[in-house]
Structures are given as C-alpha cells and as structure tokens.
Amino acid sequence: MRTIPALIVAAPAALISASAFAAAYLTIPQAQSALFPDADRFVDATVHLSDEQLRRIKSLSGVRQRNSEQLVWRAERNGKLLGWVILDDVIGKHEFITYVAGLTPDGRVRGIEVLIYRETYGGEIREAQWRNHFRDKSLRDRFELDEDIPNITGATLSCRNVMQGVKKLLALHQVALLEMSP
Amino acid sequence: MDPNMPRWKQGRSQLAAFVWFGGCSAPALFGFTAQADENLFGYMNGAEPLPRGAPLLLGAMTLHRLDDNARCNVQDFAAQFEYGFTERIAGTLSLQSLGRDGCRAVHDKQSLTPSALGISTRYSVLSPARHAYGLALLTTVSYAWHSSVPDGADAVTVEERLALQRYLLDGQLILLANLSFSFESADAQTMTGLLGSGATYRFAPNWFAGAEMFYIHADGDENKRVLYGGPTLHYGAARWWSTLTWVADLYSSASNSEGVALSPSNQIRFKVGWNF
C-alpha cells in the first residue's frame, strides 16, 4: 500500500501538463466570416431564454438547452439580415466541443465550424467533408446518425452530440429568432 | 478454521485464499478482460468499441490487503496491449505479475513476478452512442502459473462477459452493467459468476466520479459469495487517461473444502492508458 500515495501524487501532476494541451482551430470572428463571407458586420444578439422557451426547444428538438443565455450574432450586410451565427458547445467523450452554426433567416443550416475539439479520435469532425452534410438541414429533417449525418469511427458520441446540438439550435431559431427575421 | 492446524499452515491457507480472492480464479478481478473501452471504471467494462486501427497500451496496478493481522499485501500488475481490428472487434494481449510482502505465511518478500498471460477479444454488438443501449461481448482466455504462490497450481480460465452501457444527459451520466461467467481448470474446477453495475457522472470537463458494485458467486473446491463496492475517479485527456478505484468487501461468505474461512480483501486499483 506504500505505493498508493506516490500514485495519487503522480496522477494530478501529470494532469497539469496534459491540461495545457488545447486545440483551438478558429476564433469566433474567423468562424463568423467563414459562415457569412458577404457580411460586413456581426451584431451581438445574445438571447435570454425563458423557462417556457427552454421547454419548447426541448419539445421541438428532443434535446435539452443547458443554458438560458445563448450567444448569437446577426450577420448583416448594409443593415440587411443575412442570417444568424450561434455559438454552442456540446459534450464530447471527455471535453466540450465548441462550434458555431450559421443559420439562414428562414431557419436552415448554412454551415457549421468547429472551434475546439480535443478528443482522442474523430478529428475528421473538423473537416469540410463531414461538416457539409449539415447544409440546408432544417427542423423538418430527422437528424439520424448515418442517415442524415455520417458517423465517424471512434467519435460516435461526438458526432451524435454535434448533430443533436445543431438540431437544438434550429429549434432555438424557431422559438427565439424567427420572429426577429424579416 | 481447524484450531489444531499448525499456525504456519493456517498462514499458507490464508495466503492462498487471499490470492484466490484477489482474482487468480477470477480474471475479472485482475483486469484480464479486454479493457478496450473508455475505462471509466476500475472493474466494470463498458460497451464502447475501440476504433479500427487504434492501438491502446494500458497498465493496471491493484493492491490487495489481507485482513489477518499480518499486514500481508499483494500487488498485482497487469500490462495490456489492445488493438481495434474492425469497428466492432478488438483484441487484447495481457501479462500479469504478482508480488507480496509482509505475509506471515511466507516471510520472504517477493517482488513483482510474471504469473499469467491472457488473450481477449471484444465484439461490439450495439454502440451506446448510436443506439439506445450499447452491448459488447467479451471473451477472455488466460493461463496462470502460480509457482510463486504457496499451495498454488497452474490454471486455465475462460471467461465470457456481457457489457451493457447507456448514455444519459448527452453522455454526462453513464450507466453500466456487466454479467460474466468464467470457468477455471486447475487442481480443481471452479465456476464463477459475476453480476455488476456502475454509474459515473462527468462533474467537470475531463473528470468523472462514480461508483461500482459487483457480486461474485463461485462454486468449486472453494466456495464464495462476495459483494464488492466502492468509488471510482476517472480523468481522460486526448491521448491518455487514468482511473483510480477503491472497492471494499461489503458482504462475504466463503470457505474452502476444509471449512477454512477465506478472508476477503479491500482493493485499490490504479489504471493508466495511452491511445497512440
């Protein structure tokens, strides 16, 4: 049993060095520009959701909205709304996966960009080939893994949670953003 | 225990029983079962498959203490190499070593000595992230040479294990259940059944805390029914992870064919693995 204290001490020490590892691939402004290259400005439109809105999002998407505050930006060109950019994070195998989704004013996915992904497997989630499967998806789509969105081996939970996260953002758009669209 | 039995022989019997309790007759306790999952628990297996082409190196140190006033400690170290052959099938090679010190039965201290080899396969029937439940079938064959253990004998063990896993709260809460049957052929033949479950919650990024519990029922030359349970803590990073688990015997009823009571043990297991 004498080795136990050494093990307990060694483990956190190793963790500290590992925690320094982080893979941030895009900044928020870079992701905004990638999703709406025609926009000349992105206006903060952070949404504060009521309990009733949280319930409606869960009802529409089947996915719980964890936070009542959601970071949203209006993508504009010459004051005209081009779409919405929403920052979200979902649970990966061990860490949160941070991504932004671009939605059109009528509630379709324009694209997604992965900002932070730190899981062991599934780095392909950042590649356009996978992300492009989200284009034009709306709440009318089923969002089934391997039917609407392909699975990535070793990252099934990440794929599923990002897919369901996007579906949840489409529900949020319908509940909180649609009325602000022209 | 027979009061007329010489003290040295009592000690030998207790040590043999202790090592047996620790898992020489139950590979599940020693980690010989293919561990190619998230390793959120020390003893219970998950149903997540190892991806195709993915190698994993795992080390598991388990410390056992015999409650016989002799402060007898046994160390068990298992090294495993695992590889994902397909998206559903993974294979594992294991080498186990045993060491001891402070045991009254044998006064010499023994450092870790290779004591067993094992090979395991895992077949993932359902993925817990894609289906409502995950289900995996694990098969393990191990050969143990017990020359370093008093009264020990070589043994071949075959184990079949079913692992059931369910994600809740988007994967923040994970539930597991295991059911296994193993058959050991040594001087005597032993059938062992294990039923266990565990729950763990991700309380912070990278960190899981939970508990696991398992019941073992063995019939053979020595009979035992024992319930283990305790907390477990897991940390996972991109390329490596570690798990620390402590289990105590919550209930035990065991004796060998001579009517000698077998002393159960508390165990601490520390696992560390690298995905490379």
Image (cartoon, helix red, strand yellow):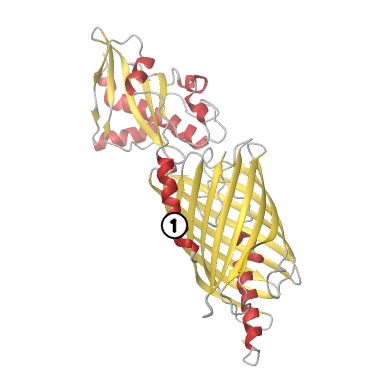
The residue that mark 1 highlights is A8
Q: Position of residue A133 (x, y in %)?
A: 49, 21
Q: Taking A181 as reference, is B162 left or right?
A: right
- Above or below, A34 against B85 in this view is above
Q: Position of residue B266 (x, y in %)?
A: 51, 69
Q: Residue at x 62, y 91 (%)?
A: B3
Determine which quarter of the picture holds residue B124: top right
Determine which quarter of the picture holds residue B44: bottom right
Q: Position of residue A152 (x, y in %)?
A: 55, 30
Q: Residue at x 63, y 74 (%)?
A: B108
- Compare residues B201 and B153 and report the one nearer the observer: B153
Residue B23 in view: yes
Q: Residue furthest top?
A: A78
Residue B259 in view: no
Q: Chain of mark 1?
A: A
Say what secondary structure mark 1 lies in: helix
Determine which quarter of the picture holds residue B205: top left
Neighbourhood count class around disc 1 (C-alpha, 10 Å): few under 14, some 14–19, many 20 upward: few
Q: Residue at x 66, y 89 (%)?
A: B5
Q: Taking B50 as reference, is A95 left or right?
A: left
- Above or below, B213 against B9 in this view is above
- Compare residues A124 and B225 and report the one nearer the observer: A124
Q: Taking A86 as reference, is B244 left or right?
A: right
- Above or below, B198 against B190 in this view is above
Instruction: Work out which quarter of the rendered image holds the C terminus of chain A and state it.
Output: top left
- Compare residues B25 and B16 and report the one nearer the observer: B16
User: For the residue marked with disc 1, what is the amino acid?
Assistant: Ile
Q: Position of residue A64 (x, y in %)?
A: 36, 38
- Above or below, A29 against A90 in this view is above
Total tally of numbered discs in the picture: 1
